Image (spheres, coloured by chain):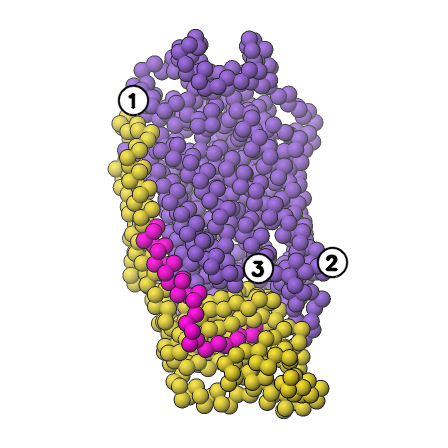
Chain colours: A yellow, B purple
Amino acid sequence: MHAGFIFLAVIVGSVLFHIFTPWWWTDIASNWGAMDDTINLTFWIGGGVFILVCLFMVFCLLRYSYKEGRKVEYKPEDHKLEKILTIATTVGVIALLAPGLIVYNDYINTPKNALQIEVNAWQWGWQYRLPGEDGKLGTAKVININDDNPFGINLDDPNGKDDILIQSDVLHLKTDRPVKILLRSLDVLHNYYVPQFRAKMDAIPGIISYYWFEPNKVGEYEVLCAEYCGVGHYAMRAKVIVENESNYENWLNEQETFSDLIAKQGNDNLKTTLIAKSND
Amino acid sequence: MSDEYKNQSSPLEAQSSETMSGSSNGSATDIDYVRPAELPEQDLYHGHSFITKWVFCQDAKIIGVQYFLTAVFTGIVGLILSWLMRLQLGYPDLVPFITAEHYYQFVTMHGMIMVVYFLTALFLGGFGNYLIPLMVGARDMVFPYVNMVSFWMFFIAVCVLMASFFVPGGPTGAGWTLYPPQAILPGSPGSGAGIILMLVSLSLFVIGFTMGGLNYIITILQARTRGMTLMRMPLTIWGIFTATALAMLAFPALLVSCIMMTLDKVLETSFFMPAILQAGEVLDYGGGSPVLFQHLFWFFGHPEVYIVALPAFGIVSDLISVHARKNIFGYRMMVWAIVGIGALSFFVWAHHMYVSGMNPWFGFFFATTTLIIAVPTALKVYNWIITLFRANIRMNTVMLFCLGFIVTFVNGGITGIFLGNVAVDIPLSDTYFVIAHFHMVMGIAPLMVIMGAVYHWFPLVTGRMLSEKLGKWHFWITFLGAYSIYFPMHYLGFIGVPRRYFEMYDSPYVASATGMNEFITLAALIVGASQLIFIYNIVASLRIGKPAGKNPWKANSLEWLTPDVPPTHGNWGDKLPIIYRWPYDFNVPGAKEDYITQTTPPSEVINAEVEKT
């Protein structure tokens, strides 16, 4: 069989695979539909170029395979053709890049009403911290961490006192309210990734990184760590539960604040310091 | 040897091109005129004993073969590691002895071996050494002794790397990117002796490679024969030259990051280490930045992609031109595209770090530069397929591998546009889409070129042809198999399956991926095993292959025009060749044959209507 036909079969097979594939995106559950749109745009333009290039190649193979004495074109350069190809490619690239950059601009500019949630990662697990009534998270440091202060909140920061601490890997979110995820790592790199939300970002020790999204579909989602973090990487899962406002408030009211935790654990030193600081 | 040079009246006076083309210069009217040599010929060291001839050898051709064989050995190790990984992913019950630690060690060693010790060493050390002096018409590299030391440094680096399999704790399992802090902390496998040996081995590799690289660059710039202008060099040489220049600029970033991480590990400095709490204890580190390492690593790591790709671009251009019996289309644009891609490759590194937590504003800059690279790259693809248009295409094994390269490279290049465009990258990064992309574009595509190049130049190196029949079987199994490994794998990435997962457990939306994983594993086993056909073909053809004779492909470039085939030490016998044209004069109208070699003077092909010389 002529090799050209096998290459043709590869291209047709690729297209058929794409049409009939059972493997495709999970249903989106956040506001980042625009990311899916840019991907689809890239898919159609890129896929089209791939098919055209390959079909042209197959045509040449079938039409010009070796024959003794075949007349071959001798034309080292063709400036006009090269210019057309350069311009067409540049236009195509701009058409892909521009929408991408617009979406990215949204991605890095968090809406003002976003709820801040700190995600705390370590080898190998997650915990969360939400601001209390003041709407602000207290500052924190790795070296402050001990059994009484699992998040390492700075005791002299009054904002930290009413922070809500969730020492579990299950996070609840309410629908249609943007959240700004602030990522902290206590040890190595991690990444808080829910495929249905599309968004992700690494957590880095020593730095607070962030991203935002707005969950818009009630349900339970699996969180996967998406940055290699050692032997337990593949097992570093968590859960996000997206629910309506009233369920969310019920859940939130059951959670402990930092001061509750200290009162419960009865560490006198810490309690005294905290009270002293808040009286300043 | 240098009498030609002595016969010139003013031998060391550099002549500008103006004096050549001006009609006032009497000799320019002679159509066969070539500028005189400006430098005397080098004296070569001639080895006589077995050791100086074959072991500590100073002949670039032998060094090239040494590099090639050593790199292929590491490649086989990398291939076996990939089999073990695939077995774990597809059929975990068959391989209960593979633990998560082992799996991550396989991932790491497979990646590092394939990128650095296999592909880089093979293209630049292997093909570079063999082809540069032959293609530019030099007797050898300009510093043969340093060239010999370069190979042995590489050899020691490979030994150190392989030794890490046998130390307590095993080789490092930090991922091939070796990101700190995990690379040197106990939560990763091989974070003791394993990671130190890896860092030492990489440092040795860089040192050895610098010696080789200086040789390649200076040989290409200084030791070309008479008439071999830069714009008459085969694209293979342009690819290797630019890649080597990139390597000289990029590898230092790797070297310093290796040294800094070694210090962090051994002396507990904190270049890359912030305050860390591990297993309930605050470690003695503080103030360092893990992202700094990522910047250094990818400042090396992205040009590294092109260090592998550019020689492949160059070689495939030459193979296509020879076997399509047509000049490469748009030679000058091909040269500028190679140089342009090389230059741009230093301004795109952070596209590997869109979700790394670096300053998010960088995303705009790096997405733009990354997509700009798509333009010269696309032009190269157009030029390859336009070269096939109205050509006379020999459908032999070499050409098949070139075609396989075009398909896989275009596929992988386009998925690169997904990942380079920052908003599109966010959902796809760290998923199997990335794995599929880079294996297609810098795994399979360069491998296609390497295999095509072996079929093409084997007759030159050994004097015998490889079997076409076995070659075609080898091609189709490798190409179709590799394509069916990586094409469907993109779709795992669409689902959102993260990379570097030892097992997926019961995640609901990846249940459907099990079947695909089994299929991919089977394909990987077949493709790997089919390389035995290749090895058998090489070994058997050494003895029973059809004698190649001189210039069996009817190529124009200089390496086929040596007085002895295979070429001997010193390459050119008594007299260096003189070059009259570029290497792509195929099917020139008016010429008797369908090719005109680079050494054919215009007076011998007086009727040929050549456009470009």
Q: Is residue B393 in the magenta section?
A: no
> Which of the 4 image quarters holds residue A15?
bottom left
Q: Quadrant of the N terminus of chain B?
A: top right
Q: Secondary structure at mark 1?
A: loop
Q: Which residue is mark 2?
A: B267
Q: Secondary structure at mark 2?
A: loop
**Chain of residue at mark 1:** B
Marks 3, 2: nearer the viewer: 3
**Mark 1 or mark 2, earlier in chain:** 2
Residue B436 location, x and y as percent? Answer: 44, 56
Q: Are marks 3 and 2 on the same chain?
A: yes
Residue A256 location, x and y as percent? Answer: 55, 88
Circle 3 residues within 10 Å: few <14, some 14–19, many ≥20: many
Q: Is residue A111 in the magenta section?
A: yes
**Chain of residue at mark 2:** B
Circle 2 residues within 10 Å: few <14, some 14–19, many ≥20: few
What amino acid is at disc 1? Pro
Q: Quadrant of the C terminus of chain B?
A: top left
Residue B461 location, x and y as percent? Answer: 52, 31
Frontmost residue, B426 versus B17: B17
What residue range appears in magenta? Answer: A93-121
What amino acid is at disc 3? Val
Q: Which residue is mark 3?
A: B291
Would you say residue B331 is visible in this rendering? yes
Q: Residue at x 60, y 67 (%)?
A: A205
Q: In the picture provided, is B195 more to the left or to the right than B247? A: right
Would you say residue B123 is visible in this rendering? no
**Chain of residue at mark 3:** B
